[in-house]
Image (spheres, rainbow, N blue to C red):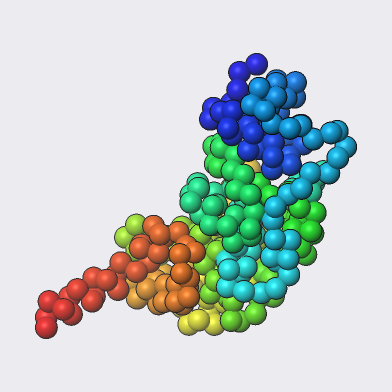
Amino acid sequence: MPRNPGMTDEKIIELYKSGLSYDKLCNIIGLSDRAIRNVLTKNGVALNPIGRRRIHKVNEDFFKTWSHEMAWVLGLFITDGHVNKKVHSVYLAQKDEDLLRKVAKLMDANPTIAQGTGTRTTPMLIINSKIIKQDLERFGVTPNKSYSVAFPNVPEEFLPAFVRGVIDGDGWVQNRGYVMNVTTASELFANGLLSVLQDWNLRSEITIELTQSKKTIYRIWVKGKHDLPKLANILYEEAGELFNENKRLRMIQHAIISEQTILQLE
Protein backbone atom coordinates (compact mmCIF):
# COMPACT_ATOMS: atom_id res chain seq x y z
CA MET A 1 0.00 0.00 0.00
CA PRO A 2 1.67 3.29 -1.08
CA ARG A 3 1.87 6.27 1.25
CA ASN A 4 -0.19 9.34 0.54
CA PRO A 5 1.78 12.27 -0.95
CA GLY A 6 3.95 14.13 1.55
CA MET A 7 3.89 11.35 4.15
CA THR A 8 7.59 11.17 5.01
CA ASP A 9 8.86 9.26 8.04
CA GLU A 10 9.18 12.59 9.87
CA LYS A 11 5.54 13.52 9.11
CA ILE A 12 4.33 10.06 10.22
CA ILE A 13 6.20 10.44 13.52
CA GLU A 14 4.74 13.92 14.00
CA LEU A 15 1.20 12.69 13.38
CA TYR A 16 1.65 9.72 15.70
CA LYS A 17 2.91 11.93 18.52
CA SER A 18 -0.13 14.20 18.10
CA GLY A 19 -2.23 11.40 19.61
CA LEU A 20 -4.39 10.42 16.66
CA SER A 21 -5.91 6.95 16.66
CA TYR A 22 -4.53 4.35 14.26
CA ASP A 23 -7.78 4.53 12.27
CA LYS A 24 -7.18 8.24 11.67
CA LEU A 25 -3.49 7.74 10.99
CA CYS A 26 -4.23 5.08 8.39
CA ASN A 27 -6.62 7.40 6.53
CA ILE A 28 -4.22 10.36 6.57
CA ILE A 29 -1.01 8.45 5.86
CA GLY A 30 -2.29 5.75 3.51
CA LEU A 31 -0.56 2.87 5.31
CA SER A 32 -1.85 0.03 7.46
CA ASP A 33 -1.46 0.29 11.23
CA ARG A 34 1.22 -2.41 11.09
CA ALA A 35 3.18 -0.48 8.45
CA ILE A 36 2.92 2.68 10.55
CA ARG A 37 4.28 0.86 13.59
CA ASN A 38 7.16 -0.45 11.46
CA VAL A 39 8.06 3.13 10.46
CA LEU A 40 7.94 4.25 14.09
CA THR A 41 10.03 1.32 15.32
CA LYS A 42 12.60 1.83 12.53
CA ASN A 43 13.04 5.44 13.69
CA GLY A 44 13.35 4.53 17.36
CA VAL A 45 9.98 6.00 18.43
CA ALA A 46 8.65 4.53 21.67
CA LEU A 47 5.15 3.13 21.07
CA ASN A 48 2.41 3.89 23.56
CA PRO A 49 0.79 0.79 25.07
CA ILE A 50 -2.69 0.14 23.68
CA GLY A 51 -5.34 1.80 25.82
CA ARG A 52 -2.94 4.24 27.47
CA ARG A 53 -3.93 7.87 27.22
CA ARG A 54 -1.47 9.98 25.28
CA ILE A 55 -0.48 13.44 26.42
CA HIS A 56 -1.42 16.23 24.02
CA LYS A 57 0.15 19.64 24.34
CA VAL A 58 -2.49 22.37 24.05
CA ASN A 59 -3.79 25.20 26.23
CA GLU A 60 -7.16 23.75 27.16
CA ASP A 61 -8.28 27.06 28.69
CA PHE A 62 -7.86 28.89 25.37
CA PHE A 63 -11.58 29.28 24.58
CA LYS A 64 -12.63 29.98 28.17
CA THR A 65 -11.61 33.65 28.29
CA TRP A 66 -12.22 36.29 25.64
CA SER A 67 -9.22 38.00 24.07
CA HIS A 68 -8.43 39.43 20.64
CA GLU A 69 -6.44 36.28 19.85
CA MET A 70 -9.18 33.92 21.04
CA ALA A 71 -11.84 35.82 19.07
CA TRP A 72 -9.81 35.62 15.85
CA VAL A 73 -9.22 31.88 16.24
CA LEU A 74 -12.90 31.33 17.06
CA GLY A 75 -13.86 33.12 13.83
CA LEU A 76 -11.64 30.73 11.91
CA PHE A 77 -13.04 27.64 13.61
CA ILE A 78 -16.65 28.73 13.10
CA THR A 79 -16.01 29.08 9.36
CA ASP A 80 -13.27 26.55 8.51
CA GLY A 81 -13.22 24.24 11.52
CA HIS A 82 -15.08 21.10 12.46
CA VAL A 83 -15.19 18.59 15.30
CA ASN A 84 -15.03 14.83 15.08
CA LYS A 85 -18.22 12.93 15.96
CA LYS A 86 -16.44 9.89 17.39
CA VAL A 87 -13.20 11.11 18.98
CA HIS A 88 -12.12 14.19 20.89
CA SER A 89 -10.42 15.92 17.97
CA VAL A 90 -10.98 19.26 16.26
CA TYR A 91 -9.72 20.29 12.84
CA LEU A 92 -9.02 23.58 11.14
CA ALA A 93 -8.58 23.49 7.35
CA GLN A 94 -6.82 26.39 5.57
CA LYS A 95 -4.87 26.83 2.36
CA ASP A 96 -2.52 29.17 4.24
CA GLU A 97 -0.27 26.88 6.31
CA ASP A 98 1.40 29.88 7.94
CA LEU A 99 -1.98 30.88 9.34
CA LEU A 100 -2.43 27.36 10.78
CA ARG A 101 0.95 27.64 12.49
CA LYS A 102 -0.09 30.98 14.01
CA VAL A 103 -3.20 29.34 15.43
CA ALA A 104 -1.18 26.43 16.84
CA LYS A 105 1.25 28.85 18.47
CA LEU A 106 -1.55 30.91 20.04
CA MET A 107 -3.12 27.74 21.46
CA ASP A 108 0.23 26.35 22.67
CA ALA A 109 -0.55 23.30 20.56
CA ASN A 110 1.76 20.85 18.83
CA PRO A 111 1.67 22.08 15.21
CA THR A 112 0.33 18.86 13.69
CA ILE A 113 -0.60 19.83 10.14
CA ALA A 114 -1.84 17.09 7.84
CA GLN A 115 -1.32 17.73 4.15
CA GLY A 116 -4.18 17.32 1.70
CA THR A 117 -4.74 13.80 0.46
CA GLY A 118 -7.18 12.26 -2.00
CA THR A 119 -10.20 14.52 -2.53
CA ARG A 120 -9.12 16.78 0.36
CA THR A 121 -6.44 19.11 -0.94
CA THR A 122 -6.39 21.65 1.90
CA PRO A 123 -3.85 21.40 4.76
CA MET A 124 -5.46 20.78 8.14
CA LEU A 125 -4.42 21.56 11.72
CA ILE A 126 -5.34 18.72 14.09
CA ILE A 127 -5.88 19.32 17.82
CA ASN A 128 -6.79 16.48 20.17
CA SER A 129 -8.59 17.63 23.30
CA LYS A 130 -11.94 16.80 24.85
CA ILE A 131 -12.08 20.19 26.56
CA ILE A 132 -11.31 22.18 23.39
CA LYS A 133 -13.94 20.16 21.54
CA GLN A 134 -16.55 20.85 24.23
CA ASP A 135 -15.74 24.57 24.32
CA LEU A 136 -16.06 24.87 20.54
CA GLU A 137 -19.36 22.99 20.62
CA ARG A 138 -20.56 25.54 23.18
CA PHE A 139 -19.99 28.19 20.50
CA GLY A 140 -21.89 26.16 17.92
CA VAL A 141 -18.99 24.35 16.22
CA THR A 142 -20.72 20.97 16.01
CA PRO A 143 -20.34 18.14 13.47
CA ASN A 144 -23.28 19.58 11.47
CA LYS A 145 -22.65 23.27 12.06
CA SER A 146 -22.82 24.47 8.44
CA TYR A 147 -26.58 25.04 8.45
CA SER A 148 -27.20 25.67 12.14
CA VAL A 149 -24.37 27.73 13.62
CA ALA A 150 -25.52 31.05 15.04
CA PHE A 151 -23.52 34.24 15.32
CA PRO A 152 -22.03 33.95 18.83
CA ASN A 153 -22.48 36.52 21.56
CA VAL A 154 -19.07 38.18 21.13
CA PRO A 155 -18.21 41.07 23.46
CA GLU A 156 -18.13 44.30 21.45
CA GLU A 157 -14.44 44.85 22.20
CA PHE A 158 -13.53 41.63 20.40
CA LEU A 159 -15.94 41.82 17.46
CA PRO A 160 -13.30 43.17 15.01
CA ALA A 161 -10.98 40.25 15.75
CA PHE A 162 -13.81 37.73 15.44
CA VAL A 163 -15.05 39.16 12.12
CA ARG A 164 -11.45 39.25 10.85
CA GLY A 165 -11.24 35.51 11.61
CA VAL A 166 -14.54 34.92 9.79
CA ILE A 167 -13.28 36.78 6.72
CA ASP A 168 -9.92 35.00 6.85
CA GLY A 169 -11.89 31.76 6.91
CA ASP A 170 -14.85 32.08 4.53
CA GLY A 171 -14.37 35.59 3.17
CA TRP A 172 -13.58 36.69 -0.37
CA VAL A 173 -12.17 40.08 -1.31
CA GLN A 174 -12.26 41.17 -4.95
CA ASN A 175 -8.77 41.77 -6.35
CA ARG A 176 -9.89 45.25 -7.49
CA GLY A 177 -10.91 46.10 -3.93
CA TYR A 178 -14.53 47.13 -4.53
CA VAL A 179 -16.43 44.28 -2.81
CA MET A 180 -16.01 41.70 -0.05
CA ASN A 181 -18.32 38.86 0.89
CA VAL A 182 -18.60 36.05 3.40
CA THR A 183 -20.45 32.88 2.37
CA THR A 184 -22.41 30.75 4.83
CA ALA A 185 -25.20 28.19 4.75
CA SER A 186 -26.55 29.39 8.10
CA GLU A 187 -29.25 32.05 7.98
CA LEU A 188 -28.75 32.78 11.69
CA PHE A 189 -25.05 33.43 11.21
CA ALA A 190 -25.65 35.53 8.08
CA ASN A 191 -28.14 37.80 9.85
CA GLY A 192 -25.86 38.18 12.86
CA LEU A 193 -22.88 39.18 10.74
CA LEU A 194 -24.98 41.61 8.69
CA SER A 195 -26.17 43.29 11.89
CA VAL A 196 -22.57 43.86 13.01
CA LEU A 197 -21.54 45.33 9.64
CA GLN A 198 -24.57 47.63 9.66
CA ASP A 199 -23.71 48.77 13.20
CA TRP A 200 -20.30 49.73 11.80
CA ASN A 201 -22.12 51.92 9.23
CA LEU A 202 -20.85 49.94 6.27
CA ARG A 203 -22.70 49.55 2.97
CA SER A 204 -23.74 45.94 3.44
CA GLU A 205 -26.43 43.48 2.36
CA ILE A 206 -27.31 39.77 2.08
CA THR A 207 -27.96 37.92 -1.15
CA ILE A 208 -29.45 34.41 -1.27
CA GLU A 209 -28.52 31.73 -3.80
CA LEU A 210 -29.35 28.10 -4.50
CA THR A 211 -26.52 25.66 -5.13
CA GLN A 212 -26.70 22.99 -7.83
CA SER A 213 -27.84 20.58 -5.11
CA LYS A 214 -30.69 22.99 -4.20
CA LYS A 215 -29.10 24.06 -0.90
CA THR A 216 -29.54 27.68 0.19
CA ILE A 217 -26.44 29.77 0.76
CA TYR A 218 -26.15 33.34 2.00
CA ARG A 219 -23.57 35.90 0.94
CA ILE A 220 -23.00 38.87 3.23
CA TRP A 221 -21.52 41.80 1.29
CA VAL A 222 -19.62 44.99 1.97
CA LYS A 223 -19.45 47.17 -1.15
CA GLY A 224 -17.64 50.30 -2.22
CA LYS A 225 -14.06 51.51 -2.60
CA HIS A 226 -14.50 53.71 0.47
CA ASP A 227 -16.26 51.11 2.62
CA LEU A 228 -13.64 48.37 2.27
CA PRO A 229 -10.81 50.57 3.62
CA LYS A 230 -13.21 51.64 6.39
CA LEU A 231 -13.80 47.98 7.22
CA ALA A 232 -10.05 47.37 7.14
CA ASN A 233 -9.48 50.18 9.65
CA ILE A 234 -11.85 48.42 12.04
CA LEU A 235 -10.49 44.91 11.51
CA TYR A 236 -6.75 45.47 11.52
CA GLU A 237 -6.27 48.18 14.16
CA GLU A 238 -5.12 45.67 16.80
CA ALA A 239 -4.48 42.67 14.55
CA GLY A 240 -0.72 42.37 14.93
CA GLU A 241 0.19 39.57 12.51
CA LEU A 242 -3.08 37.67 12.87
CA PHE A 243 -4.62 37.99 9.43
CA ASN A 244 -4.49 36.87 5.83
CA GLU A 245 -2.15 39.34 4.13
CA ASN A 246 -3.69 39.08 0.63
CA LYS A 247 -7.18 39.90 1.87
CA ARG A 248 -5.92 42.85 3.89
CA LEU A 249 -4.02 44.30 0.93
CA ARG A 250 -7.05 43.99 -1.33
CA MET A 251 -9.20 45.82 1.22
CA ILE A 252 -6.86 48.76 1.71
CA GLN A 253 -5.67 49.29 -1.87
CA HIS A 254 -7.96 52.26 -2.57
CA ALA A 255 -6.87 53.95 0.66
CA ILE A 256 -3.24 53.55 -0.46
CA ILE A 257 -4.06 55.03 -3.89
CA SER A 258 -5.79 58.01 -2.26
CA GLU A 259 -2.82 58.67 0.01
CA GLN A 260 -0.42 58.51 -2.93
CA THR A 261 -2.59 60.94 -4.91
CA ILE A 262 -2.63 63.41 -2.03
CA LEU A 263 1.16 63.21 -1.68
CA GLN A 264 1.60 63.85 -5.41
CA LEU A 265 -0.64 66.93 -5.21
CA GLU A 266 1.36 68.28 -2.32
Q: Residue at x 76, y 32 (%)?
A: 47
Residue 140 quadrant: bottom right
The spot of residue 215 in percent (x, y) is 65, 50
Q: Nearer the viewer, residue 95 or 108?
A: 108
The spot of residue 252 in percent (x, y) is 34, 69
Image side of residue 18 versus residue 265, left or right: right
Q: Nearer the viewer, residue 244 or 148?
A: 244
Find the residue positioned furthest to the left. 265
Q: Nearer the viewer, residue 257 or 183?
A: 257
The spot of residue 108 in percent (x, y) is 63, 58
Whether residue 258 is visible here, answered yes or no, is: yes
Whether residue 214 is visible here, answered yes or no, is: no
Q: Residue at x 53, y 74 (%)?
A: 160
Residue 148 quadrant: bottom right
Residue 218 quadrant: bottom right
Find the residue positioned furthest to the top. 1
Q: Residue at x 64, y 34 (%)?
A: 13
Q: What count of labels does the image hold?
A: 0
Image side of residue 160 versus residue 145, left or right: left
The spot of residue 207 in percent (x, y) is 54, 63
Question: From the viewer's perspective, is residue 2 above or below residue 63?
Answer: above
Q: Quadrant of the C terminus?
A: bottom left
Q: Nearer the viewer, residue 170 or 109?
A: 109
Q: Residue at x 18, y 80 (%)?
A: 262
Image side of residue 245 versus residue 189, left or right: left
Question: From the viewer's perspective, is residue 205 above or below residue 31?
Answer: below
Question: From the viewer's perspective, is residue 152 above or below residue 21?
Answer: below
Q: Quadrant of the N terminus?
A: top right
